[in-house]
């Protein structure tokens, strides 16, 4: 019979009390409280937007989830993924095939597509056992191109898995059943356009809360600490007796599941939720993959919150470019037709003048102002060397490329 430590009860009590104290809203750090206010504002946004505006903004919520998916693996572990649309396509096509060709319910389609994308994460992550740096990034870039060719190769049919085919370059023509819609066949049928827009928006908002909560919890856990350690010094992780490759695979699986889940929900919520290659890869096959990188850079890599803010800034810039309807002198081009060049230029300027991104820079400046207001010394940088996540990733990538091409001996 096991003996009971007389202090066990007190330890449990103190532990619960400590957790309660940490979860009190007033005890949270200022940045966490600001993040909570931001989500409350997102939740109240339907109060001020018209149905058409709300429908367009619903797509921004999915961009936030896509950017979070990229940030989990690239912002935290430093393993740059150039083909993240691979996971979005698996999720989008997966749920479309499950629900329209196998006649399964919507939630089975979403769960199956999430699992399929997670398996895709394993396929991308396994090369991490032998590859890293630019070589692993090349694998991520090739993956969506291979998947695109599979869609073409099995356009007429894929035995057992997709008997009606994958649609080729044009994609699937049958829209998956909708979660909320005016028409028949939806999981929830409504009678007005406003109710439809509200239903779609809050379905996407709930999905965003799930994605954010899962990724935030993982990146703040011991596994998240290892992710960050891999980004900063992989050799140090090995010297501590940990296997970096296993954690990289886990990061790719998590990122794949999150990206696939977001794309699957998008197909059933909309707007523009058709499973075709232009939606899920982008017009040039890699456009969406590049755009999520731009979003994470704008907001700040390795923060999760930065991915959300970056997606918002990217969408706002895109809307502004579309709104500026004038002809550029001499060139004779419509400014609105330049998109996404202005968004990419903004990302380049951010990398040069604000490499840590908008969120980390504002947190840093806010801490300095708060310390000055209190008459305290300026706070020390969070990182020992004062580098941001973006700067660490760029520095690590540069070192790995120099090692490949011979460094000083080239």
Image: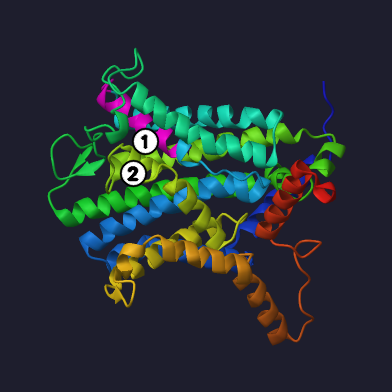
Rendered residue at 61%/32% (across/down): 125
- Residue 323, above or below 178: below
Looking at the image, is mark 2 or mark 1 earlier in the sequence? Answer: 1
State whether the magenta stretch is mostly helix, strand or loop: helix
Residue 317 picture quarter: bottom left
Category of crowding for the residue at label 2, using alpha-carbon neighbours closer than 10 angstroms: few (below 14), some (14–19), many (at least 20): many
Magenta residue check for 101: yes
- Residue 92, above or below 196: above
Q: Quadrant of the N terminus?
A: top right
Residue at disc 2, secondary structure = helix
**Separation of residues labelled 2 and 1 (CA atoms):** 9 Å
Name the residue tied to disc 1: 92
Asked whether 369 or 374 is in front, the reply is 369
Residue numbers of the magenta segment: 87-103
Q: Residue furthest top?
A: 159
Horizontal placement of 304 versus 55: left or right? right
Rendered residue at 55%/69% (across/down): 349
Give the total of numbered labels: 2
**Image spot of residue 21 (x, y percent):** 66, 59
Horizontal placement of 182 versus 148: left or right? left
Residue 279's disc number: 2
Residue 395 picture quarter: bottom right
**Image spot of residue 272 (x, y percent):** 27, 47
Magenta residue check for 56: no
**Image spot of residue 392 (x, y percent):** 72, 56
Residue 183 picture quarter: top left
Asked whether 67 or 32 is in front, the reply is 67
Horizontal placement of 147 versus 387: left or right? left
């Amino acid at each position: 019979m096991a003996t009971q430590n007389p202090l066990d009860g007190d330890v449990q009590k103190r532990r619960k009390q400590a957790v309660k104290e940490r979860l009190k809203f007033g005890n949270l750090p200022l940045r966490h409280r600001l993040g909570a206010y931001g989500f409350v504002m997102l939740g109240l946004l339907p109060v001020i937007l018209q149905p058409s505006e709300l429908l367009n903004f619903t797509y921004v919520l999915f961009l936030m989830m896509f950017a979070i998916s990229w940030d989990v693996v690239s912002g935290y572990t430093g393993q740059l993924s150039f083909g993240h649309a691979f996971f979005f396509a698996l999720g989008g096509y997966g749920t479309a095939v499950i629900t329209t060709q196998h006649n399964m319910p919507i939630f089975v389609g979403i769960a199956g597509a999430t699992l399929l994308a997670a398996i895709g994460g394993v396929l991308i992550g396994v090369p991490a056992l032998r590859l890293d740096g630019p070589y692993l990034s090349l694998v991520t870039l090739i993956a969506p191109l291979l998947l695109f060719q599979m869609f073409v190769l099995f356009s007429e049919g894929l035995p057992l898995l997709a008997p009606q085919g994958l649609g080729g370059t044009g994609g699937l023509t049958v829209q998956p059943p909708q979660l909320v819609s005016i028409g028949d066949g939806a999981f929830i049928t409504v009678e007005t356009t406003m109710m439809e827009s509200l239903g779609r928006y809050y379905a996407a908002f709930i999905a965003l809360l799930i994605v954010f909560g899962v990724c935030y919890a993982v990146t703040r856990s011991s596994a998240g600490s290892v992710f960050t350690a891999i980004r900063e010094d992989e050799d140090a992780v090995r010297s501590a007796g940990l296997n970096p490759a296993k954690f990289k695979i886990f990061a790719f699986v998590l990122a794949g599941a999150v990206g696939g889940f977001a794309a699957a929900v998008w197909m059933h919520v909309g707007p523009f939720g058709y499973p075709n290659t232009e939606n899920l890869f982008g017009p040039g096959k890699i456009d969406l993959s590049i755009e999520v990188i731009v979003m994470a850079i704008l907001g700040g890599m390795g923060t999760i919150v930065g991915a959300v803010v970056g997606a918002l800034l990217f969408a706002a810039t895109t809307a502004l470019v579309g709104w500026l309807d004038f002809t550029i002198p001499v060139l004779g081009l419509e400014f609105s037709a330049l998109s996404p060049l202005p968004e990419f230029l903004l990302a380049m300027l951010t990398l040069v003048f604000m490499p840590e991104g908008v969120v980390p820079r504002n947190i840093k400046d806010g801490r300095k102002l708060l310390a000055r207001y209190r008459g305290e010394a300026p706070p020390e940088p969070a990182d020992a060397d004062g580098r941001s996540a973006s700067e660490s990733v760029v520095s690590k990538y540069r070192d790995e490329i120099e090692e490949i091409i011979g460094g000083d001996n080239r």
